Amino acid sequence: MGWITFIYFTLLARARWNDRELKFARTLIFTVEEINRDTKLLPGVSLGYKLYNGCGSENLLRAAVEAVIGEDSKGCSDQIQALIGHSSSGVSEDINTILSPLSIPQVSHLSTCACLSDKRRYPTFFRTVPSDHFQILGLVQLMKYFDWRWVGIIHSEGLYSAEGTAKFHMEAKKEGICVEYTLPYSKTSQFKLKAIVKTLRESSSKVVLLFLSLSYTKQAVLASVKRKIILQGAMGFAFPQTDIPGLDEFLLSLKPSDEPHSTIIKAFWEKFFDCSFSPSHTTTMCTGTEDLRTVSSDYTDVTHFRAENNVYKAVYLVAYALHSLLQCKNGSNPTTGKPCVNKNEVHPKLVLDHIHYVNFTTQNGAMVVIDENGGSVAQYDLVNWQMKENGSVEIVKIGQYDSSYPEGEKFKLKDNLKIVWGGHSHEVPRSVCTEPCPLGTRKAIDKFKLVCCFDCFECPEGTISNQTNSPDCLICPPEFWPNEKKDNCVLKPTEYLSYKEIMGALLTGFGCVGVFLSLLTSIIFFTHKETPIVKANNSELSFLLLFSLKLCFLCSLTFIGRPTEWSCMLRHTAFGITFVLCISCVLGKTIVVLMAFSATLPASNMMKWFGPAKQRLSVLAFTLIQVIICIFWVTINPPLPKRNMKYYKEKIILECALGSAVGFCAVLGYIGLLALLCFILAFLARKLPDSFNEAKFITFSMLIFFAVWITFIPAYVSSPGKFTVAVEIFAILASSFGLLICIFFPKCYIIIFKPEQNSKKHLLGKIPPRTL
């Protein structure tokens, strides 16, 4: 019944007959005979075929015309139902342009150009070979897997290479892969060959992508070897290796007697065995009984079948389309629901329609499913050409690409498999225009360069990049700061005045010394409380002053350590209250000195107005005012812990925020007011007789007090971090030591070292006043 026409091509020159095309033609014959032996696939129907030499435009045109009119050169009118061929994408495009208006299906076994998937232009074109679109996707995934971002392309001139190169450019760009150069290759142009050699020597890319046919590739590799450029470590996609039972024996059993009228078979035979069927003085005569197993060629290589399987599937595709078309059940086709078709009613349009319904598995396990673009599932073996010690080349499967798998699983490499690269190296070659920007840097793209060629700049202060080729540097959160490599944000170290550090320990030590000296002074005064010098200097206020000094020294310790809510409120209020208590006592003693001197004057009764009760009450009143100020401060806007991240960028200062600045100024201002009043009174009483006078010592202590606190203000404002607290502690300790030393040490000196002066007689003696 219907015919399948297979068009193959050979080269005109006798020495260059294409062995592979002969192999394809014989595979078609083998497949047709296998189908005709199958009693289930097409029962009662036999397939026929016509083979055409596809070399030359006249042959192609003749084959196309015969397919249209259904008549060959001998006048036979057996119209074909489908056409299988051609190997070349460009030729298949031309043939389909002629056949598609008549709805004659064309099935190609090797035309891979992605352009042929356009069903608007090529509605009757189908293929059992994957489109180059999938090969390009696989190549891009291969480049991505090995991180090859910088490649060169050498391509032949023609539809296949032009379309493939353009598609690769587009898909590679999506993955950030750049093409350094794209060069055309020609077998005849020495100028183009020299340009390729020059570029290969000067280029920085280590990976070259060849968009060439097999014959072009062989010639390009040989040309590069002659010019001392070795393209080793070849890798690429190949059709899956399959087994077609019986095909090897069928191919090798070919004899010229099987096709006695075929000049092409005779021509191949003469090429294989270097003989001649015509008498010749230069070659031996061919007998026709020579054994093909003794010949090494593409035709006799039957160790594995790859492209041949596509021919095998192409013939079966048409057979299964006919099988679907001729199905009949209860008067209708079970696939389409339309009326049954008799085998004598078969025509190309019906075959074309039923190809779309094909879904089958061949006898060798090859699955065939035609998609909406007329193509089949893309399956490739990733192979590596590995040179053996004896000089032979072994093609090793190292992975696969299967478009039927889910995204992310289409491309796979075998585990624990050694890939041989150039120079027999097992290290993956590196091919990038610019090495990826490391962590801690950002990638800066130059608009005048390819995206693969860029600059790397270190991240600015306070920013990081935690991935390679980061386009931007990220700002760390407020409480974090970049590490030294600027690839991660780490928690900022906190700073506060600690007991464990040297400065904190020294200040703590001075505070403890102050408490100890105050306590020692209290003991000395207590043990000598009945002596004239202790009584004459108002022992009650002296003991209260010593107590307040102990508190002043102790309150300095509240400024050391990690700030907490309670410690912040305690340190400022304790400091304010204890210092007021201390200054109130000093003020009381100054007033007592003045009152005592005035009481010695005739008709003076000043002492009765400022007796012990009044002294205690004045100290309490002065202190109570500060207590009230502190209560308002703490109630309205108290001092609280604060994480200061503004002063230092790389660390956090733990400090006590003042809360209300007015409250803090009120506390200091009140202390300063009392100190100023005390200084004025003491200064007025500085020239009183020594026997009653400690005013000059109070004057000295107030001078020290003011000197310390006036110096404290600018030092406090300008000191960074924990040094601010240290300055405040120093001011507290210095002013406390000033009061202790100036007021009490002279008396202790007399009590311990000059006991003879600690007498009533000495104190009542008239001693000339001294100037300050």
Image: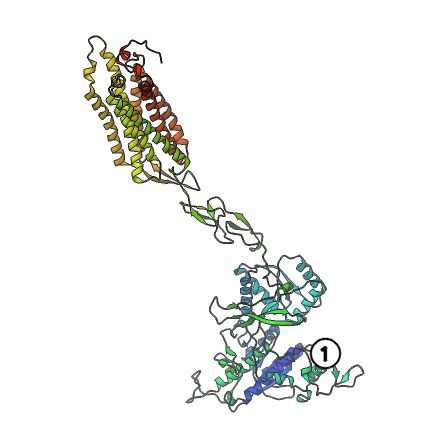
Q: Nearer the viewer, residue 763 or 430?
A: 763
Work out whether residue 9 can be spotted.
no
Q: Amino acid at mark 1?
A: Arg
* Crowding near the residue tagged with mark 1, few <14, some 14–19, many ≥20 C-alpha atoms within 10 Å: few
Which quadrant does the C terminus fall into? top left
State the image coordinates of residue 434 (x, y, percent, origin top left). 58, 54
Left or right for 158, reference 600: right
Which quadrant does the N terminus fall into? bottom right
State the image coordinates of residue 711 (x, y, percent, origin top left). 39, 26
Secondary structure under tag 1 reads helix
Q: How many marks?
A: 1
Q: Nearer the viewer, residue 299 or 631?
A: 631
**Is 388 drawn above or below residue 677 in the view shown?**
below
State the image coordinates of residue 702 (x, y, percent, origin top left). 33, 21
**Is 335 drawn above or below residue 94 in the view shown?**
below
For residue 722, what is the image quadrant?
A: top left
Left or right for 609, reference 136: left
Work out whether residue 729 can be spotted.
yes
Which colour assignment does the render follow? rainbow
Return the residue at label 1.
Answer: 14
The residue at the point 43 percent across, 39 percent down is 648
Q: Nearer the viewer, residue 730 or 478?
A: 730
For residue 336, what is the image quadrant?
A: bottom left
Q: Nearer the viewer, residue 136 or 222?
A: 222
**Is 720 drawn above or below residue 738 in the view shown?**
below
State the image coordinates of residue 119 (x, y, percent, origin top left). 52, 73
Q: Which residue extends farthest bottom?
A: 44
Q: Which residue extends farthest right?
A: 281
